[in-house]
Image (cartoon, helix red, strand yellow):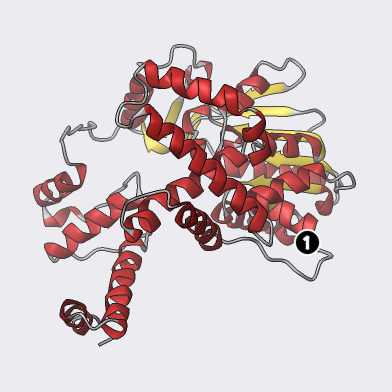
Amino acid sequence: MINRDTLVISNPGTGKTTMISNEVINLIKEGVKPEKILCITFTNNAVSELQKNIDKLLIANKIKNVTAYDVNIYTFHALAFQELFQSKAEKNIVSYNIARYLIYKKLRDLEAFNYGRDYVIEDIVPKLENAIRYIKSFGIMPVDIAKNRDMIMESLRRKYNSGIVRNIGLEEEEYLFDYFYQAFNYYEENKENPDFNDLLFQFQKLEDKKTYEYVFVDELQDVNDIESRIAMSTGNVKFLVGDRKQSIFGFQGGALSVFNSLIGNSGIEKKDLKINYRSTETILAYSKQYYLKFENDVPELENFRGTKKNGNKVKIVEVDSPEESVMEVINSIPESSGNIGIIARTNSQIDTISSLLDRYNIDYSSDSNVHTINQAKKDITAFLKGILYDRPDDIINAMVTPFS
């Protein structure tokens, strides 16, 4: 039974979710009430996977009158939402669309940019909205920017003079900073409900929030500063699991510094997971060798091994256009080889690859519906322009949409 704070330093494919599920079951078997256990992870899919695993183990262990839904399993934001709004009739969160509208409205009022409206709405505004979400994940608000303006501007000039900023003039950079601050401030003053970052702020400040006997945190390497404080203050005993080699949420403030500080904490028990159940030894050996080119001190990779035999040799193809190269690789594989999987880093890459597959009449299915969404947006926009405007080109474009 877990009796002290524990940090599990894991490797890819070593069964983090299975291990957390087993620890939860062991606690229940030891007599801990399921409602006293909290599991926090990052995505709704991860929540569902954890619930399924725990349910299977409850059945396998013949534990009656308990289901996975009796255990508190949430994302960070869902946990905050549940605690803050469970007794309130109004449960509205500011959507990204509302946030972007308020930012655009302020930029328009300031006459900030000389670009076309479409470019401002589709390119600049989303980037500013993402930037606001990012800095709010560190607890930074407009009042903090105003208070530290001189220091920020000095840092900006220093970076510009050192060559870090190259494609924009210093005066333009200073104007952009001012526009960003004003848009951020306007958004905070005019939104009528909290946004997702506000949920975490408000939850962290709650003095009477619920405390659990045991708190499990999955994907610890991706928590930001606020999320780490929530995790550490919400339970009596913490069981933290993560892999610093898989940190992917830096865009929303995820900080490896939290993970590394816990590694150096002598008051926390350390464990590691070193047996991979997913990949062949060939892939593991290649991945380990490649990773160690950039990192020297990674003790969890010592004796990292797999349960599967050697597979085919990894082949690396270096090209200027990864999306175009997908077609070359596909065409080089015999049809009798079975299904082909394509993994891309961004939705825009999936969009491009989907277009290429469409062009070559290759059947495929995708976990991302971004291509369909983008095409639908174009068709809807073209159709509405044909109805609302008298320009011949708009009318012709509207006639070739599915809605005509």
Residue shown at 37% from the left, 54% from the top: 120
Query: Which residue is located at x 61 percent, y 47 percent?
Result: 185
Looking at the picture, which amino acid does disc 1 mark? Answer: Phe
Location of residue 392 in the rendering, given as x and y in whole percent from the top left corner: 16, 81
Q: Quadrant of residue 30?
A: top right
Q: Badge 1 is on which residue?
A: 85
Disc 1 crowd rating (10 Å Cα; few below 14, some 14-19, many 20+) is few
Q: Position of residue 121 (x, y in %)?
A: 39, 58
Q: Is residue 354 left or right of residue 121?
A: left
* Residue at the extreme top of the image, as rendered: 296
The quarter in which the C terminus is drawn is bottom left
Q: Residue furthest right?
A: 208
Residue 75 visible in the picture: no
Q: Quadrant of the N terminus?
A: top right
Which residue is at the front of the view, 404 or 114? 114
Q: Position of 149 compared to 290: left or right? A: right
Q: Furthest residue to the bottom?
A: 404
The image shows residue 331 at horizontal and vertical percentages of 10, 51
Q: Is residue 124 visible?
A: yes
Front residue of 271 and 375: 375
Query: Residue at 52% across / 15% down in the picture?
Result: 299
338 over 387 or under it: above or below:
above
In the figure, residue 396 lies in which quadrant? bottom left
